[in-house]
Amino acid sequence: SKTRSGKTIIEHRKTDNGMRKSDKIYIAGHRGMVGSAIKRNLEAKGFSNFVERTSNELDLRNQANVKEFFANEKPDFVFLAAAKVGGIQANNTYRAEFLYDNLMIQNNVIHQSHVTGVKKLMFLGSSCIYPKMAPQPMNEDALLTGKLEPTNEPYAIAKIAGIKMCDAYRSQYGSDFISVMPTNLYGPNDNYNLNNSHVLPALIRKFHTAKKQNDPEVIMWGTGSPLREFMHADDLADACVFLMEEYSDSGFVNIGTGEEVSIFDLATTIKQVVGYQGNITKDLTKPDGTPRKLMDASKLHNLGWKHKISLKEGIESVYINLETKDWF
Ligand code: GFB
């Protein structure tokens, strides 16, 4: 079959449940970096019937409250982008919450989506589901073939459970629940708290602060040699909406760029974008985490989607558009 651009794609059962403009869409986590990007993408494509709850209004870990919400609102489409997330240090420190909160959120949302007959649900996972030593680039088939990276094992176990839950509801009940595995992300509404953020926003903040304060050095955690892949949240959101419309199958889809960069080279790029003149110093007491984490994005590419925003452009746009830069 063909995509809209005319490119030949791998045959997957296309959903009978195409999103109509009148359909009610629930984005769990709509104020987060990923959820807000999905909402912007849907709005740009003409969707406007959203049902929303902030985390204060609805605690997704609470089974009774989630049950009541789904029974009352009966959304047609669900993007499950609500999760307890964070960088390497947060994952490693709050191991209990990363497991408990994520399992509770996804169990409640996926199960109530089944109970109330949601037409289609998308579960968002993470590239950390793959074994620490998975062959690179990491293909979807590498799931559960080896030991996980210890710093984020609790998060990964929760996300693997979410994938298996979607697959189980599909095979037992025919639910149209799909899973996608994004690579490391950055973008508007990112978290800039140095204790629990990811590397990219952390380094933007550190270089910006050092520039303003004329500090001679910026501390980069670890050796700088781990390799990572980064995608802008707007690209991720576009891929999610594309897959919501085009993909209906068990077996999740990696969402990545297929391009990787060392942490040191990332730091050098951010240093340039910010315009900082000082030095980069390594803090070897901090963990490196997985040595290399590159997605094999060929399944997604064969379905007919590719990212648009380069890393340099993405970092520039995030830095220019940052509203809060008074961090010191
Ligand atoms: O982005 P990050 O926290 O997460 O760290 P992971 C990536 C790499 O950047 C690690 C280094 O090698 C860090 O040691 N790094 C250097 C820094 N300087 C800094 C800094 O100032 N802050 C941070 N945070 N890192 C997470 C997982 O792994 O990635 C999650 O723990 C999830 O489960 C997420 O998968 C996408 O890429 O190592």
Image (tube, helix red, strand yellow):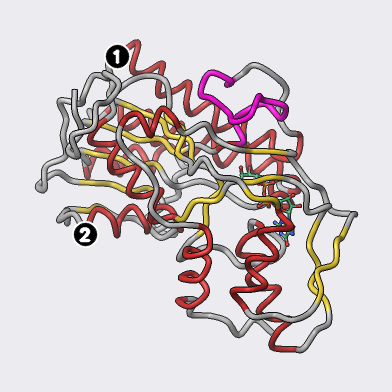
Q: Is residue 133 magenta?
A: yes
Between 112 and 44, the one nearer to me in the picture: 44
Q: In whole angstroms, how far apart are the C-alphas of marks 2 and 1?
A: 33 Å
Magenta stretch, overall SS:
loop
Q: Quadrant of the N terminus?
A: top left
Q: Which residue is mark 1?
A: 173
Q: Which residues are magenta?
A: 128-143
The percent position of residue 307, horizontal first and vertical second, equals 39, 48
**What amino acid is labelled 1 in the image?**
Tyr
Residue found 48% across the figure and 80% down from its top: 323
Answer with left or right where residue 312 lies relative to residue 117: right
Answer with left or right where residue 39 lies relative to residue 326: left
The percent position of residue 230, horizontal first and vertical second, equals 55, 51
The percent position of residue 136, horizontal first and vertical second, equals 63, 29
Residue 44 - label: 2
The local secondary structure at tag 1 comes to helix
Residue found 64% across the figure and 44% down from its top: 97
Can you name the residue that lies furthest to the bottom here? 213
The local secondary structure at tag 2 comes to helix
Neighbor class of circle 2 (other Cα within 10 Å; few <14, some 14-19, many 20+) is: few
**What amino acid is labelled 2 in the image?**
Ala
Q: Is residue 120 magenta?
A: no
